[in-house]
C-alpha cells in the first residue's frame, strides 16, 4: 500500500515534484548492504539489480553482487533508478543517540549515491524530489492518521524548512561557521548548539537532527499524500524570504525563542507564543518557571485524549509517556556517572545544579553544574539535555529539587520538567489538537509563526 500510494504520486503529473534534495541516510559505516528491487544504472552505464554490498578501498567505492563479485567501482558511485525501481537498505539506524534509537530496514525511491570517506567508512545518500521526500517526512514524523488540516500545516512547514535549507546551500559563502557544532568553549563555560551546517556531503540527514525521513518503509497514508498534494509548492514566507520553520514535539504550553536553542539572534516568526486559547505569560525567572512547570496549565498540547495522540504519534514515540509534564529522579552517584560519561569532565562530588538563564518557555539555556572538582556552565538547551541523561532529557524546561543528606551533599536529585524538544516554532501535539478542534491549516501556522504569509514557490 505504501509503495502504491507513492507510485501514484509519481505517476500523477498534475503536481510539480519540485527540486531534488539529497538526504544522508547512513554515515560512518564499514559497509552498506541492500537490495535493488528493479534496475539501477551506474554513470558508467552498467545495470545493477538484486542484493549488493558496498565497501570502500583506497578511496574507491566497490559494489559487489550477492556472489561477491565486484560489479561497480568508482570514487563516487551513483545508482540511478529506472522506472519504479526501489532501493532497500538494511540496518539503517533511526533515532540516533535518542532514547528511541534502533536499526530498521528501509525502502527508498530515487537514486542512491555512495561516497567513500577518508577514514574508510561509507556515506549513503538518497536523491529524491522534494514532494516525494515530504510525503515520506509527514508519514515518518507523524502517524499521518491525524487531522488533515494538521498534516497540511506540517507539509507547508516541512517544505519551508527544507526550501530555506536548500536556498542557504546555494549561498557562495556562508556567514556562519561550518564546524560540527557552533558556540564557544572556555575552561568554565561550554556553549554549544547544532545547526544543519553539520552536513557537507548532502542537504539534510534522515534523522531527528533535520527531519525524520524513513523512505517509504512505513505505510504512506492517503491522508499524507492528500496533504502534500493539497499544499504542493507552498511555503511560509516572512518579508519575502522563505521561513526557516522549526518545530518540536510538545512545547509544554509556551513556545520558545529561537536564541534559547541556537545562535543569539531574534527571529520574529520564531518568537515565543502562548500555545493556548488563553494568554500565558513568559516564565524566564526561577520563581515563574517553577510555578509554571509544577502547574498543569490549559494548553493545546496538554492533551488528555489518548486517541488523538495515537492518531498522530508513530509507535516508537508513543513509548514516551507524559511529556507535557514529567519527572526524572537520580541518586547523586547516578547523575555524577552520567555527567562524566556525557561531558567527559570529572566534576568530583556533585554539589548543585543552578539554572542561570531561561527562555520564555522556562527552557534553560545556561546551567551551572557545581562539583567539588570542577564548576562548569553548560548550554544551550540540547547540550544540557544531553549531559543530564543517558539518552536525552525530554527538554531543558525543568526545575531542580535536591534532597540532601546529613553531610549536606545531595542524595536524590529530582528534575520536574515540561515539554518534549526545543519548543521553538510549531508544537506538533498542539497543532494536531488545534486541527481536531476545527482550526484550519492557515490558522495553525499563523498561531505558531507570527506575521508569516503563505506563498506558492513552484
Ligand atoms: Zn541533520
Ligand atoms: Zn505546545
Image: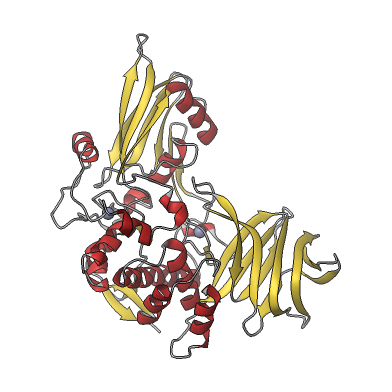
User: Which residue is located at x 33 percent, y 48 percent?
Assistant: 260
The picture quadrant where one finds residue 118 is bottom right
Q: Nearer the viewer, residue 239 or 37?
A: 37
Residue at screen point 30% across, 27% down? 401
- Is residue 59 visible in this depiction of the protein? no
Is 21 on the left or on the right of 90, as rendered?
Answer: left
Point out the image quarter for the C terminus: bottom left
Count of residue discs: 0
Q: Quadrant of residue 65?
A: bottom right
The spot of residue 428 in percent (x, y) is 33, 59
Instruction: Name above or below for residue 283 compared with residue 166.
Output: above
In the image, is 59 to the left or to the right of 156? right
x, y percent for residue 170: 49, 73
Rendered view: 442 above or below 266 = below
The correct choice, above or below, for 232 with respect to 185 in the image is below
Where is 294 relative to 108, above or below? Answer: above
* Residue at image location 51% in from the left, 27% down from the top: 337
**Residue 425 at what x, y percent from top left?**
31, 59
Q: Position of residue 269 (x, y in %)?
A: 27, 63
Of 246 and 83, the residue lying toward us: 83
Of 256 and 377, the residue lying toward us: 256
Look at the image and name its color scheme. Answer: secondary structure
- Depth order, front residue of 195/84: 84
User: In the image, 128: left or right of 381?
Assistant: right
Amino acid at each position: 500500500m505504501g509503495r502504491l500510494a507513492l507510485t501514484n504520486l509519481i505517476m500523477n503529473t498534475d503536481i510539480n515534484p519540485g527540486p531534488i534534495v539529497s538526504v544522508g541516510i547512513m554515515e560512518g559505516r564499514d559497509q552498506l548492504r541492500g537490495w535493488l528491487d528493479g534496475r539501477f544504472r551506474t554513470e558508467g552505464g552498467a545495470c545493477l539489480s538484486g542484493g549488493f554490498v558496498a565497501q570502500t578501498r583506497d578511496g574507491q567505492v566497490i559494489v559487489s553482487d550477492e556472489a561477491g563479485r565486484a560489479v561497480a567501482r568508482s570514487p563516487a558511485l551513483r545508482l540511478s533508478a529506472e522506472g519504479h525501481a526501489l532501493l532497500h537498505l538494511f540496518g539503517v539506524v533511526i533515532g540516533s543517540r535518542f532514547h528511541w534509537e534502533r536499526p530498521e530496514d528501509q525502502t527508498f525511491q530515487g537514486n542512491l549515491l555512495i561516497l567513500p570517506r577518508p577514514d574508510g567508512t561509507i556515506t549513503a545518500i538518497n536523491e529524491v524530489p522534494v514532494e516525494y521526500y515530504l510525503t515520506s517526512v509527514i508519514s515518518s514524523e507523524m502517524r499521518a492518521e491525524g487531522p488533515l488540516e494538521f498534516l497540511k500545516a506540517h507539509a507547508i512547514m516541512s517544505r519551508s524548512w527544507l526550501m530555506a535549507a536548500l536556498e542557504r546551500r546555494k549561498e557562495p559563502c556562508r556567514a556562519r561557521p561550518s564546524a560540527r557544532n557552533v558556540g564557544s568553549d572556555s575552561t568554565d563555560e561550554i556553549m554549544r548548539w547544532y545547526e544543519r551546517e553539520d552536513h557537507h556531503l548532502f542537504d539534510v540527514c534522515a534523522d531527528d537532527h533535520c527531519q525524520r525521513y524513513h523512505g517509504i518503509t512505513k505505510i504512506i497514508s492517503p491522508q499524507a499524500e492528500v496533504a502534500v498534494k493539497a499544499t504542493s509548492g507552498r511555503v511560509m514566507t516572512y518579508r519575502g524570504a522563505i521561513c526557516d520553520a522549526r518545530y518540536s514535539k510538545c512545547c509544554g504550553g509556551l513556545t520558545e525563542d529561537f536564541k534559547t536553542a541556537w545562535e543569539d539572534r531574534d527571529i520574529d516568526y520564531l518568537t515565543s507564543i502562548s500555545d493556548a486559547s488563553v494568554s500565558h505569560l513568559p516564565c524566564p525567572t526561577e520563581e515563574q518557571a517553577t510555578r509554571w512547570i509544577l502547574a498543569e496549565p490549559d494548553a493545546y498540547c496538554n492533551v488528555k485524549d489518548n486517541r488523538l495522540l495515537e492518531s498522530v504519534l508513530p509507535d516508537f514515540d508513543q513509548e514516551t509517556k507524559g511529556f507535557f509534564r514529567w519527572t526524572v529522579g537520580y541518586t547523586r552517584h547516578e547523575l555524577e556517572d552520567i555527567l562524566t560519561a556525557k561531558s567527559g569532565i570529572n566534576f568530583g562530588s556533585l554539589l548543585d545544579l543552578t539554572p542561570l538563564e531561561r527562555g520564555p518557555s522556562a527552557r534553560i539555556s545556561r546551567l551551572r553544574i557545581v562539583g567539588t572538582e570542577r564548576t562548569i556552565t553548560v548550554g544551550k538547551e540540547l547540550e544540557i539535555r544531553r549531559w543530564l541523561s543517558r539518552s536525552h532529557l525530554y527538554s531543558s524546561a525543568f526545575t531542580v529539587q535536591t534532597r540532601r543528606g546529613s553531610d549536606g551533599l545531595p542524595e536524590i536529585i529530582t528534575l520536574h520538567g515540561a515539554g518534549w524538544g526545543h519548543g521553538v516554532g510549531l508544537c506538533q501535539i498542539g497543532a494536531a489538537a488545534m486541527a481536531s478542534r476545527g482550526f484550519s491549516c492557515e490558522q495553525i501556522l499563523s498561531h505558531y509563526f507570527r506575521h508569516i504569509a503563505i506563498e506558492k514557490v513552484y
